[in-house]
């Protein structure tokens, strides 16, 4: 793994040059972007005692008391992902007013802009927002207001993917989508599903009705699979959930027929290298299948997933790929182009961002 600090001159591609590229991010969870200062501010405002010293708030162990009964051990789907989902429950539970939610959205857009990201499909899973006092409508309204204010201020344009949780029931999932189709909340353009597939088991069939309703209503679809599930999770996402993109999808590499299928059908995999290393899906970048998937003709986007607790930024993820796989500036431009094309941005915004990128290639 190439995470040791390198002098800027020793890196294959300078992070500043990556930052300057117009680009999109398509696999990032709003819940995974709160900085330590945000958490301390929210806890103080909401009069919630910290579960441990400030320096330990991003450690899964700090929130592990609530996850008793889950065996320890590395690996997505074991304590790693389960403990992490409990951390998300804790931090989102701190947000209790519309002003706090709007501020969180605004700061997210600013954070994206600092990495040169011009458009984002951000994932929001309302099951984590346990402290929210009102309805799901009021949560999404407040977030949309924050994103609108950010856009007015010239920051990154953000649209939302509402995410179901793998452990929800069939009735809960269809209930959420019925609301989504009826209410059509501002800036929510997609349905997603995330969570721990090792814990939930195979759930494609359970969510098929919800995703079919979403497709028929014109909502876009992106599905977490092929991380805590193997290739069978990706097949279910494609064949039962009508997924247009797969979030992660890296374990598709275990089924050559699946790799051919996603390459042939142009299904992008939204890959998050450091997230996979952090949760132990792969031990290092050499054994991570990102480069091989790309070489075999699969469309790959490179993303941060949960940048604050992982301690990363988008330009750092792309530079890690350059260092690990020998990718150069042209590969970075290709990643930027792919990120824009794979996003759910409007055709007009895509055309304008791609036009900005064209002279650099
Ligand atoms: Zn994710």
Image (cartoon, rainbow, N blue to C red):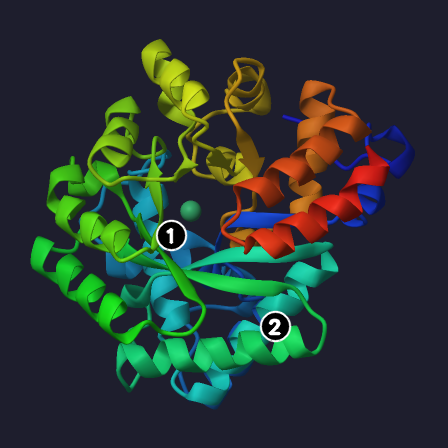
Q: Position of residue 298 (x, y in %)?
A: 50, 22
- Compared across the picture, whether 31 is left or right of 147 comes to left
Tell me the residue at 57%/77% (across/down). Answer: 148
**Which label sits in the foreground, 2 or 1?**
2
Q: In the rendered image, which quarter is residue 41 located in? A: bottom right
Residue 352 visible to an observer of this rendering = yes
Q: Nearer the viewer, residue 56 or 202?
A: 202
Q: Is residue 117 above or below residue 234?
A: below
For label 2, the residue is 107
Q: Residues within 10 Å of mark 1 (few under 14, many from 20)?
A: many
For label 1, the residue is 84
* Name of the residue lying farthest toward the left: 171
Q: In the rendered image, which quarter is residue 93 located in? A: bottom left
First in sequence, mark 2 or 1: give its number.
1
Query: If the image is split into quadrants, where does the N terminus sit?
Result: top right
Residue 288 visible to an observer of this rendering = no
All told, the count of numbered labels is 2
SS assignment at label 1: helix
- Compared across the picture, whether 24 is left or right of 16 comes to left
Tell me the residue at 18%/66% (across/down). Answer: 178
């Amino acid at each position: 793994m190439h995470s040791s600090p390198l002098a800027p001159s020793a890196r294959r591609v300078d992070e500043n040059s990556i930052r300057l590229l117009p680009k999109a991010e398509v696999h990032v969870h709003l819940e995974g972007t709160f900085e330590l200062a945000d958490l301390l501010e929210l806890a103080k405002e909401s009069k919630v005692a910290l579960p441990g010293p400030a320096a330990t708030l991003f450690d899964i162990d700090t929130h592990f008391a609530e996850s008793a009964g889950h065996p320890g051990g590395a690996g997505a789907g074991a304590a790693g992902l389960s403990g992490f989902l409990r951390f998300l429950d804790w931090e989102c539970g701190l947000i209790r007013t519309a002003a706090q939610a709007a501020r969180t959205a605004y700061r997210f857009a600013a954070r994206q802009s600092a990495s040169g990201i011009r458009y984002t499909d951000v994932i929001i899973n309302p099951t984590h927002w346990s402290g929210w006092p009102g309805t799901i409508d009021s949560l999404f309204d407040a977030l949309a207001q924050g994103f609108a204010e950010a856009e007015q201020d010239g920051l990154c344009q953000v649209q939302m993917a509402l995410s179901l949780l793998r452990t929800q029931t069939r009735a809960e999932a269809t209930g959420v989508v019925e609301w989504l189709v009826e209410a059509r909340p501002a800036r929510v353009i997609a349905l997603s599903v995330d969570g721990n597939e090792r814990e939930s088991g195979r759930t494609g069939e359970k969510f098929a009705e919800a995703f079919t309703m979403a497709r028929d209503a014109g909502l876009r679809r992106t599905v977490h699979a092929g991380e805590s599930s193997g290739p069978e999770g990706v097949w279910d996402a494609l064949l039962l959930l009508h997924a247009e993109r797969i979030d992660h999808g890296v374990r598709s590499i275990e089924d050559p027929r699946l790799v051919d299928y996603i390459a042939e059908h142009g299904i992008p995999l939204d890959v998050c290298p450091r997230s996979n290393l952090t949760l132990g899906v792969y031990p290092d970048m050499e054994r991570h299948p990102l480069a091989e998937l790309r070489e075999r003709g699969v469309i790959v986007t490179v993303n941060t997933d949960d940048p604050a607790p992982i301690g990363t930024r988008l330009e750092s993820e792309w530079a890690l790929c350059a260092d690990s796989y020998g990718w150069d500036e042209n590969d970075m431009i290709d990643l930027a182009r792919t990120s824009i094309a794979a996003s759910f941005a409007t055709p007009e915004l895509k055309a304008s961002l791609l036009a900005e990128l064209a002279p650099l290639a």
